[in-house]
Image: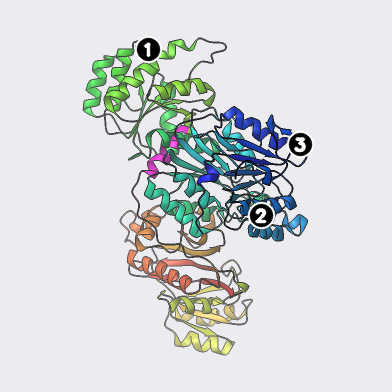
């Protein structure tokens, strides 16, 4: 169901239910924000709350409120929500805790949440167990605490599942205009995706930031990403849950399923959502996107008056896969004219300090440097603290930077190597000069890298393959797993199974050499002495004796795959929070040593697989390293697609598929070991 959230998010009137400190705070904050409409406190005994006249009941209000903050206990919340729905209110924020997030502690949290949803019906509600939101565009808030933001005419929207993190984000002093700041709590009715889409529909919102603990409805999240793509509004996300501790905290906090870090990263990349690893990175990326939008590429021009800063820039750019293209002859000639013969010309450029304060010379230098094959320019400048120093000597940076940006027309960022050296007042002055202030070299370059990634064209992905919830999982034998995958087109070795020593002797005699003998039922056969290679007929007698001594009751005898160029891992794991995660990487004994893997979500195309393989450190081996033959790329693609076909056919019951290794030769790609774990439909 698609709900109209316009009255809730952009209300003309607000009601506040409850008489506690939180409700009084909200009323005072509404006055401080300059909210133009009425704010109606509701309390059965109090005549005044937060300086505003209180009404004894909802029925006594002079009108039907557009937005309501419900700040009473969980039982009273349910009754209040039902009454608000009956009177036609526009929507509500449910502040109370004790719902699904407290199921383990209280035992009735799920039941209470179901009752709340029934009470709300089709009336929009946010929460429960959340602070609500601040609309800085219209000065409207349903927010029971302090916040550090200010009104703006346009800006970014930020959604988080943590109210404390929302408070912290509101206190940023980086020059980022925030249009909406919203918490989502338990997402009982309105999830992250539905609220995100509603915020993106506001034409004054330029980009969306997400702090995600659990995605929830995958189809809704796909729809959010598609809506953002159509609107041309990028999304930046910080996803919690990479560690076991974070996943446990997420479950207890918001009743969300965090899922694996690899699954989350694959999901965000698939949907064109830029992933960051910290809150400062998220804020800096959103700021760059607000003022410049996604960048067409990752080529950066760096300007500073210090060799040390130039070196820091060059090293830090490496960490973020940014390029610093060499100066063109045209750039060099213009720079030489502006700087004379004393400066070594390069990118990063150290223009020295002898032109400092000469705005005309600085502007000519900055413009000459920026006017080349770069996507964004970066001026490095750390400003002195105004309480102990005089920053007026740095005024030339704003004037020269503004003139250079005006002449060339490319984005020009003003970046401080230390966040401490770019205050909010400096950031605001930079913005007024047409510059983009970025706080901190590492976070600033991370923002540029993310904006460049967002600027790359990408097609709309296929709908995700959603996993089932299988019960009673069991692991198939190697022979069973191989046969199941072979039925979907996977190439496996010719093999026979021997259940007795006599069958082992007969099989070894009948099959052509070379062969591999494997002990059945061992998880790590190589380490346990469960694999024997038979190259010559003279070895058969000794081989049989070794095979009979293996810790097993049966054997698998297979053809030996000759001359492998590389070994690959193909793995698929059911991630309930994100779908089926496909892992491609270096296989065999190198899997755990190199940890050279890349992850995608199913379904994938052959083009997706090709691109993923190219990112592996083992890619040169596959392509033919130092004159060696290349692996058969088409055969590798067929192997991965065969695994995908099997997963699609058994998605309701599948837990895991693993091929390790897939032996890649110049003519073939053969799965010499396979594992499948699957269960039953619930």
- Horizontal arrangement in the rendering, residue 183 relative to residue 268 (left or right): right
Color theme of the render: rainbow
Badge 3, how many Cα within 10 Å: few under 14, some, many 20+? some
Does dot 2 land on a helix, a strand or a loop?
A: helix
Is residue 573 part of the magenta span, yes or no? no
Alpha carbons under labels 3 and 1: distance apart: 64 Å
The percent position of residue 241, horizontal first and vertical second, equals 60, 50
Does dot 1 land on a helix, a strand or a loop?
A: loop
Which residue is nearer to you in this view: 402 or 276? 402
* Badge 2 vs badge 1, beta-carbon distance below 8 Å: no
- Does residue 616 appear in the picture of this structure? no
* Badge 2 vs badge 3, beta-carbon distance below 8 Å: no
Q: Which residue is mark 2?
A: 82
Which of label 3 and label 1 is nearer to you?
3
Badge 2, how many Cα within 10 Å: few under 14, some, many 20+? some
Q: Main secondary structure of the magenta part?
A: helix
Alpha carbons under labels 2 and 3: distance apart: 23 Å
- Picture quadrant of residue 118: bottom right
Which of the labelled discs sits on residue 356, or is there none? 1
The percent position of residue 202, horizontal first and vertical second, equals 44, 42
Q: Residue at x 51, y 67 (%)?
A: 658
Badge 1, how many Cα within 10 Å: few under 14, some, many 20+? some
Q: Which residues, given as a range, are shown in magenta?
A: 444-459
Q: Residue at x 40, y 31 (%)?
A: 314
The percent position of residue 223, horizontal first and vertical second, equals 45, 55
Which of the labelled discs sits on residue 46, or is there none? 3
Which of label 2 and label 1 is nearer to you?
2
Which residue is nearer to you in this view: 240 or 554? 240
Is residue 457 part of the magenta span, yes or no? yes
- Horizontal arrangement in the rendering, residue 65 relative to residue 362 (left or right): right
The percent position of residue 429, horizontal first and vertical second, equals 44, 20
Alpha carbons under labels 2 and 1: distance apart: 67 Å
């Amino acid at each position: 169901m698609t709900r109209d959230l316009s009255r809730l998010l952009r209300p003309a009137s607000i009601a506040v239910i409850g008489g506690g400190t939180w409700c009084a705070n909200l009323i005072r904050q509404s006055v401080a924000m300059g909210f133009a409409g009425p704010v109606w406190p509701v309390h059965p005994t109090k005549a005044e709350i937060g300086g505003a006249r209180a009404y004894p009941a909802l029925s006594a209000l002079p009108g039907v409120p557009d937005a309501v903050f419900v700040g009473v206990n969980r039982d009273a919340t349910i009754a209040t929500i039902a009454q608000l729905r009956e009177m036609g209110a526009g929507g509500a924020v449910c502040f109370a805790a004790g719902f699904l997030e407290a199921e383990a502690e209280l035992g009735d949290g799920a039941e209470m949440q179901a009752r709340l949803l029934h009470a709300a019906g089709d009336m929009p509600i946010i929460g429960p167990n959340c602070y609500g939101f601040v609309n800085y565009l219209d000065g409207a808030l349903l927010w029971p605490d302090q916040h550090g933001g200010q009104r703006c005419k346009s800006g970014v929207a930020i959604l988080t599942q943590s109210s404390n993190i929302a408070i912290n984000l509101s206190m940023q002093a980086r020059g980022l205009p925030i249009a909406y700041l919203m918490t989502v709590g338990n997402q009982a009715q309105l999830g992250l995706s539905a609220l995100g889409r509603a915020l993106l529909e506001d034409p004054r919102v330029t980009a969306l930031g997400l702090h995600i603990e659990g995605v929830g409805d995958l189809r809704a999240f796909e729809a959010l990403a598609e809506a953002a793509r159509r609107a041309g509004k990028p999304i930046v996300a910080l996803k919690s849950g990479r560690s076991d501790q974070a996943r446990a905290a997420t479950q207890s906090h918001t009743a969300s399923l965090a899922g694996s870090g690899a699954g989350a990263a694959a999901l965000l990349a698939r949907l064109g959502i830029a992933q960051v690893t910290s809150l400062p990175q998220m804020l800096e990326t959103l700021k760059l996107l607000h003022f410049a939008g996604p960048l067409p590429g990752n080529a950066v021009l760096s300007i500073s008056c210090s060799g040390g800063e130039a070196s820091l820039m060059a090293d830090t750019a490496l960490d973020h896969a940014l390029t610093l293209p060499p100066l063109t002859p045209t750039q060099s000639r213009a720079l030489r004219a502006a700087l004379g013969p004393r400066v070594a010309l390069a990118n990063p450029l150290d223009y020295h300090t002898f032109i400092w304060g000469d705005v005309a010379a600085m502007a000519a230098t900055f413009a000459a440097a920026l006017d080349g094959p770069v996507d964004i320019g970066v001026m490095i400048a750390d400003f002195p603290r105004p309480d102990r120093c005089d920053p007026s000597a740095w005024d030339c940076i704003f004037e020269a930077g503004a003139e250079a940006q005006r002449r060339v027309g490319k984005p020009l960022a003003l970046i401080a190597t230390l966040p401490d050296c770019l205050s909010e007042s400096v950031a605001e002055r930079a913005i007024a000069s047409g510059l983009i202030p970025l706080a901190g070299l590492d976070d600033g370059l991370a923002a540029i890298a993310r904006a460049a990634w967002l600027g790359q064209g990408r097609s709309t992905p296929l709908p995700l393959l959603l996993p089932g919830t299988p019960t009673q999982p069991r692991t198939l034998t190697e022979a069973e797993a191989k046969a199941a995958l072979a039925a979907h087109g996977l190439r496996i070795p010719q093999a026979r199974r021997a259940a007795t020593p006599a069958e082992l002797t007969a099989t070894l005699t009948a099959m052509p050499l070379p062969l591999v003998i494997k002990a059945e039922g061992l998880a790590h056969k190589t380490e346990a002495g469960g694999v024997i290679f038979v190259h010559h007929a003279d070895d058969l007698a000794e081989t049989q004796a070794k095979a009979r001594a293996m810790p097993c009751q049966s054997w698998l005898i297979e053809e030996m795959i000759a001359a492998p160029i590389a070994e690959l891992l193909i793995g698929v794991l059911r991630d309930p929070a994100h779908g089926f995660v496909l892992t491609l990487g270096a296989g065999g004994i190198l899997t755990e040593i190199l940890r050279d893997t890349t992850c995608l979500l199913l379904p994938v195309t052959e083009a997706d697989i090709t691109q993923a393989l190219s990112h592996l450190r083992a890619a040169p081996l596959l392509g033919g390293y130092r004159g060696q033959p290349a692996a058969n790329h088409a055969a590798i693609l067929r192997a991965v697609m065969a695994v995908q076909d099997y997963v699609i056919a058994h998605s309701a019951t599948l837990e895991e598929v693993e091929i390790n290794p897939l032996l890649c030769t110049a003519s073939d790609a053969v799965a010499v070991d396979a594992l499948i774990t699957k269960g039953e439909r619930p």
